[in-house]
Amino acid sequence: MRFLALGCALTVTTAAAHAQSAQPWSLQASALLTSANVGSGGSGVAGGGVEGQLRYTSGLWSLGGGVQYSSHSSRNDATDRDDNIKLTGVFVEPRRTFVVSSPRVGPYVALRGAVLRQSNNFGGSSSSGYAIGGGGGVIVALTDRVNLDGGAAVLRQSLGNFTIGSQEFRFPTLTSYVAKAGVSIGFGAPKPL
């Protein structure tokens, strides 16, 4: 039994990390599905969006940076219409991939920090804020240059103050849940194994 465990451990630690981009640079585009708990009651607000990023990979570590956009709506019974918030921002995402027995699959963990700008259809004002969080996912190598990336994250977002008429309001801190699916394309000279 000890030899089996040792053999498994050696397989996991010595396999090549092919599931990361084989090239040092990659461009990725992803679709996002989001759900946010708002305020002390924790009411849910769903949304969708997109992101694009440039990522540099070195071994099992990579660093991505890019832009994101999402739109979130909820029904406002008092006004008999949907309230909508749009979030745009820039982000940085360090990532660590783990080697498993398949050279085409790589699970990963990631952290994310973002600077955000919100605009809405109910207050007439926008505000700036931030998001910070983490998550994980799986990268699947489709070809030598193309990867499929699916993952999920939990983020805490703070969006600052906004005004309605002459009154100023503060957005509650949000806990957001994000699922994403995307495709990345590697470029540059392939890294040596």
Image (cartoon, grey):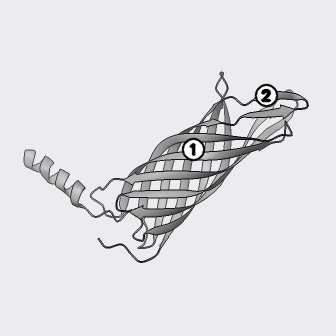
Identity, as a three-letter code, of the amino acid under mark 2: Phe
- Number of callouts: 2
Residue 171 appears in which quarter of the rendering?
A: top right
The residue furthest top is 40
Q: Nearer the viewer, residue 124 or 1?
A: 124
Q: Position of residue 59 (x, y in %)?
A: 34, 62
Q: Which of 93 and 2 is in front in this view?
A: 93
Q: Position of residue 152 (x, y in %)?
A: 51, 46
In what element is the residue under mark 1? strand
Question: Is residue 137 toward the left or the right of residue 75 in the image?
Answer: left
Query: What distance separates the C-alpha of mark 1 from that of mark 2?
Result: 26 Å
Q: Where is residue 15 in the image (x, y as percent from the top left)?
A: 25, 61
The residue furthest right is 165
Residue 178, disc = 1
Residue 45, disc = none
Question: Is residue 166 toward the left or the right of residue 29 in the image?
Answer: right
Whether residue 1 is visible here, answered yes or no, is no
- Kindly identify which residue carries mark 2: 169
